[in-house]
Structure formats: structure tokens, C-alpha cells
Amino acid sequence: MKHLEILKSPVEVSLNDFRMKGEPVIDQQRSIKDIAGIFLDQEAVKLILPETLVYTVQSWLPVAEGTPGGLFFGTSTIMPGKVGNEFFMTKGHFHARSDRAEFYWGVQGKGMLILMDRNRKTWAEEVYPGSLHCIGSEIAHRLANTGDENLIVGACWPSDAGHDYEEIALNGFSARLMEVDGNPKLI
Ligand code: ZN
């Protein structure tokens, strides 16, 4: 930009559906076939069409991944649904630089932010429109949709945080969010 120039930001976010548009925005989609292994009930997985969408992620990375001092912005949309009695959820991750924190905030729908520390203590925070969540360093995080509409969540994290999906892929969380007598419960 030039001195004294007045511009529009290259990316905007709709306040209706929280979709981002502009350049550059990265779109990712995760279907049952991509993440089948994260669910407990593998027989129930087989009853769901492999192409069934579980969640989408949009991200705006204004600087290169790994740049110290920058920020990334993202939105996650988790579809309503269950595998057996387990709610549709994201893969979940620690940060690769695990001393990096992150903000999440609820935009639409109803769900849980499932959190686990390095001692494998697991707990959750309720997510709803307006809920605000500060995810501390060394805390793994994943979202689950417990409602019957899309769960939309915004996120902002440091550009050098990175993602460590490996630890969760190998060892999972120490508890799962299941529906028990009509209510979400960590088991
Ligand atoms: Zn994160």
C-alpha cells in the first residue's frame, strides 16, 4: 500500500454464516472416510456413507506458516451428527510449538470444546453463540457438535503455533464425548 492510501482488507467474514471470502483463504473438508479412526464405534462408522461431511475449516494465513509474531484466523463448521452415541467432532491437536495458546469463540449452534492437558486430564467447555475460550499452552483441543444445526466456531492463533495431530492420532484423548440419556457426557 502507498502512504495515505485507504484500502479494504483483502478478506472479509460474513456475520450471517461466518464464511470468509477474499484472497487468500484456504478451504478444507473432512468426511467420515478421512477421520473414521477417531471414532470409538467402528461398526457404526460402516453404517455412514464415507463421503458424509463431518467438518469444514476455513483459514486465513496472512504470513507464512511458522513466522514468529504473526496471527492466523480461522472458522470451523462441524455438522450435526453422531457415530453410534459419539458426537461428530474434529481430529483435535496440540500445537507443534506447544507453548502457544489460541482463542476460540462460538458463533452458531451448540457444542463442546474438549480439552486435555499433558497429564491426560480431559474436560470440556460449553460452546454457544458468544462463548469465548482461551485455550492455554500445552492443552490439546477438539470441537464436538452436540446440537441439531451446524456448530460454527471462530479461532485466532499464533502463526508459529503449528499443529501436532500425531499425538492425538496415536493416543487419542483420555475421554470421549458421548450421548448418555439424551445428554452429552465425557466418558
Ligand atoms: Zn489449535
Image (cartoon, rainbow, N blue to C red):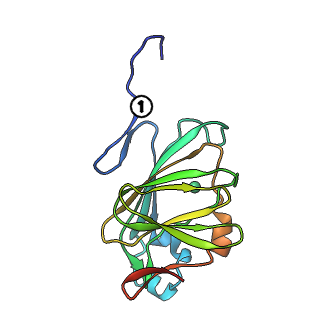
Instruction: Say which residue appears at 30% left-offset and 67% top-offset.
Output: 149
Q: In this view, does 19 lie above or below 176?
A: above
**Residue at which label 1 appears:** 10
Quadrant of the image occupied by residue 153: bottom left
Give the x, y percent position of residue 31. Answer: 44, 67
Q: Residue furthest top?
A: 3
Q: What residue type is labelled 1?
A: Pro
Q: In this view, does 141 lie above or below 44?
A: above
* The C terminus: image quadrant: bottom right
Give the x, y percent position of residue 6. Answer: 39, 17
Instruction: Say which residue appears at 53% left-offset and 36% top-offset.
Output: 62
Instruction: Say which residue appears at 69% left-offset and 55% top-offset.
Output: 98
Quadrant of the image occupied by residue 4: top left
Q: Is 170 or 173 nearer to us in this picture?
A: 173
Give the x, y percent position of residue 63. Answer: 58, 35
User: In the visual, does 168 lie left or right of 182?
Assistant: right
Give the x, y percent position of residue 144. Answer: 45, 69
Q: Is 124 or 97 nearer to us in this picture?
A: 124
Quadrant containing ligand 1 reads bottom right
Instruction: Say which residue appears at 48% left-offset and 11% top-offset.
Output: 3
Q: How crowded is mark 1: few (under 14 residues within 10 Å), some or many (20 or more)?
A: few
